[in-house]
Image: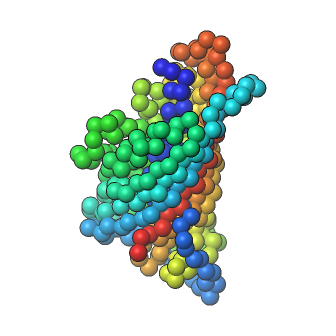
Amino acid sequence: MNRTAPFRALCLITLVSLIAPFAACGSKRTIDADDARKDSALLAYRFTPGRSLSYRMLVSQTYEVRNVEGGPTRLESRVDMDLTSVQQVLGATAEGAQLRVSFPKVSVSMRGPRADSAGHLENVVRQTEFVAQVDSRGKVIQAAPTDAAPANVKTLYPALGQAIAGLGAVFPGEPKAPGARWQDTQPLNLQMPGGDIMKGSLISNYGFNRWVRVNGRPAAEIGVQLTLSMVPGTMRVPMEGKGSGAGYLYLSTEEGILIASDVTFVSKGVYNLGGGQYNFAGGAVLEQTVEHRVTTDLAP
């Protein structure tokens, strides 16, 4: 194991959060307040078997790794992705639905020490295809690769499937009026490639802010605040992580679909290279900070 290995766990979680089926954030869009509407509406997805939705996602990520004991910055880099996410409803019941998610169009640019890996990341995301099981509120229960996913992508599982299960916009599934608030807590137990296990929780606080029009379409504006906490579990290199984020989701209550979103998230992981199984000679305490913004818009 080399010194870059301790960062793979948090990097994987970051990638997963960006390609989760309901993640969303700039593309060109207009948002106009519609204050005339004060009524309540059903805040829920409407799953129609056979329906396929295409989203454009713009992803911007910046990384910084530094020695918290006073040493120089080890790494600074930036990743930008422009991708298309296609979600097809394979089946639906009163309890939820089964979705196939793929990324047929991907463009990646990178700056920094890892710039030469842009093509590899582009290929991995393009070849990623999975089936997610969601409940009636839109919460991802589980996810697994399809037979079409190549072997090198399947090695991301079960970590990818477990991480996706902790993501996704969760609606109350009942009529709400502006001002309504609700919360969802998802325990995380992520088995990473190599056998390490990370534990923690993701808390999502939602609020129905107001009625708006997004590109001329009526929508409920849902504010979201995210809090992520991670603890080592069984990690060969002692690590702790945390994160927080905020943004907006725009739900068409008439169609029961997410039409846009804009979320920014900052996560930090601290690694003690002088402890644990590896106990690198002359170890150090390193902190990795990842800031990412994801914007998603429903394709016309």
The quarter of the picture where residue 274 lies is: top right
Q: Nearer the viewer, residue 161 or 120?
A: 120
* Residue 135 to residue 148: above or below: below
Is residue 218 among what the camera can see?
no
**At 53% across and 27% down in the image, what residue appears?**
4
* Residue 106 to residue 232: above or below: below
**At 63% across and 57% down in the image, what residue appears?**
246
**At 57% across and 77% down in the image, what residue appears?**
30
**157 horizontally vs 212: left or right:** left
Q: Position of residue 210 (x, y in %)?
A: 62, 76
Q: Nearer the viewer, residue 222 or 42?
A: 222
* Residue 238 to residue 44: above or below: above
Q: Position of residue 129 (x, y in %)?
A: 32, 50
Please give the count of numbered marks on the rendered protein: 0
Q: Position of residue 49 (x, y in %)?
A: 27, 67
Is residue 69 among what the camera can see?
yes
